[in-house]
């Protein structure tokens, strides 16, 4: 659809377009029904960013909305393909953060290596730092625990810092959390 067909009126220096959904899909690289349909333009951390209904939104959320209607309350839009730029409605589903974490973990366990901007993720099941624990660093002479970029505090003991991380991860992700001490039942 070309721009001449989309512009229906000009009032007070404002262009009003007809059929905004078609304007949205013009910015998506649509391929076969099973392929990823990547957002062509602006991206933030790999996710497509678009303006829809007068505000900046993630393009995969707009694609889901245009294809399925309103996003259910308390749900996020997840990618089955693990490609953050993908807008193919067949690759999107409404789920919880826990669903998304379980889906991500299942892709690792199945051997399907997820990708972020074309680069493989580091396996979250591995210990990811030199100390051997997730979310822990040495800072100001103590051990600093961080979860999702938020400081959980400073600890004199490495194990206490790792347990603080585990508590926050368990609170956030529930039973699908990837913990430093998964063998400890009640963190």
Image (cartoon, rainbow, N blue to C red):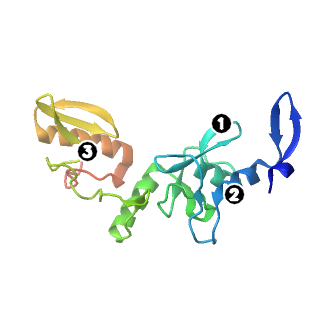
| Residue 13 position in % (x across, y down) | 82, 30
Q: Nearer the viewer, residue 7 or 24?
A: 7
Circles 3, 1 touching at the beta carbon (< 8 Å):
no
Query: Residue at the location (15% across, 38% down)?
Result: 160
Left or right: where does residue 133 sit relative to residue 47? Answer: left
- Seen at 55% across and 44% down, the residue is 74
Q: Position of residue 49 (x, y in %)?
A: 58, 45
- Which circle's residue, 3 or 2, is located before the other in the chain? 2
Q: Residues within 10 Å of mark 1 (few under 14, many from 20)?
A: few
- Estimate the spatial distance between the alpha carbons at disc 3 and disc 2, rounded to whole Å: 38 Å
Q: In the image, what residue occupies the spot 49% across and 59% down?
A: 83
For the N terminus, which image quadrant? bottom right
Task: State the SS at label 3.
Answer: helix
Residue placed most toward the observer, 156 or 22: 22
Instruction: Mark 3 vs mark 2: give the one in front.
Output: 2
Left or right: residue 141 versus residue 57 is: left
**Between disc 2 and disc 1, whose residue precedes?**
1
Q: Residues within 10 Å of mark 2 (few under 14, many from 20)?
A: few
Where is mark 1, residue-wise? 55
72 relative to 133 in the view: left or right? right
Q: Residue at x 33, y 37 (%)?
A: 149
Instruction: Identify the secondary structure beneath mark 1.
Output: strand
What number is the disc on residue 46?
A: none
Q: Which residue is mark 3?
A: 166
Q: Are marks 3 and 2 in contact (CB under 8 Å)?
A: no
Of the residues under marks 3 and 1, which one precedes in the sequence?
1
What mark, if any, has residue 67 been given in the picture? Answer: 2
């Amino acid at each position: 659809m070309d721009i001449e067909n989309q512009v229906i009126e000009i009032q007070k220096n404002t262009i009003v377009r007809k059929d905004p959904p078609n304007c949205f899909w013009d910015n998506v690289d649509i391929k076969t029904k099973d392929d990823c349909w990547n957002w062509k333009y602006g991206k933030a951390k790999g996710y497509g960013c678009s303006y829809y209904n007068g505000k900046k939104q993630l393009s995969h959320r707009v694609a889901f909305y245009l294809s399925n209607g309103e996003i259910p309350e308390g749900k996020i839009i997840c990618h089955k393909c693990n490609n953050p730029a993908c807008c193919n409605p067949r690759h999107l589903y409404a789920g919880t953060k826990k669903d998304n974490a379980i889906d991500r973990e299942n892709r690792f366990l199945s051997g399907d290596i997820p990708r972020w901007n074309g680069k493989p993720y580091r396996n979250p099941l591995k210990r990811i730092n030199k100390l051997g624990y997730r979310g822990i660093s040495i800072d100001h002479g103590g051990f600093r625990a961080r979860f999702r970029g938020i400081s959980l505090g400073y600890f004199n003991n490495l194990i206490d810092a790792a347990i603080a991380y585990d508590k926050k991860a368990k609170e956030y992700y529930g039973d699908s959390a990837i913990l430093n001490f998964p063998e400890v039942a009640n963190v």
